[in-house]
Amino acid sequence: EEEEEEEEEEELCCLWTCQVIVLEISEYGGSFQELEQMRHFLGKLECLETVKVSFDSHKKDTIELLRTNLLSLPRVSSKCNIHFI
């Protein structure tokens, strides 16, 4: 039943038709929820060319890990580049 819900959610996702080219994320902290949200954006926004990410200032000691995690996410747009600001 849970698998059916996931498939239904995939079909109903409005991001498939969204024409977003630039996405800016402020105060990214790298929580599980934030990472899943980024995975969702990168996996659905077909027109996405630029993602600008600034980090939560309290996460200075883990910025390299956060960058690595973000850069390893699959992207549906071959033009998508992630910039850390």
Image (cartoon, grey):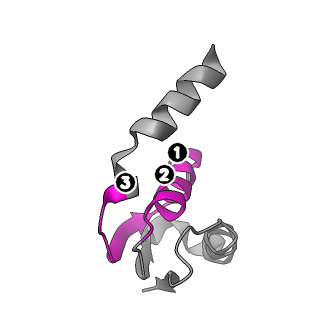
For the N terminus, the image quarter is: top right
Q: Secondary structure at mark 3?
A: helix
User: What amino acid is at disc 1?
Assistant: Gln
Rendering coords of residue 8 (x, y %): 49, 29
Rendering coords of residue 19 (x, y %): 29, 68
Q: Nearer the viewer, mark 3 or mark 1?
A: 3
Q: First in sequence: mark 3 or mark 2? A: 3
Q: Which mark is residue 33?
A: 1
Rendering coords of residue 31 (x, y %): 55, 51
Q: Are marks 1 and 2 in contact (CB under 8 Å)?
A: yes
Q: Which mark is residue 8?
A: none
Q: Which residue is mark 2?
A: 37
Q: Which mark is residue 15?
A: 3
Q: Is residue 18 magenta?
A: yes
Q: Nearer the viewer, mark 3 or mark 2?
A: 3
Which residue is painted at 30% across and 70% down in the image? 20
Q: First in sequence: mark 3 or mark 1? A: 3
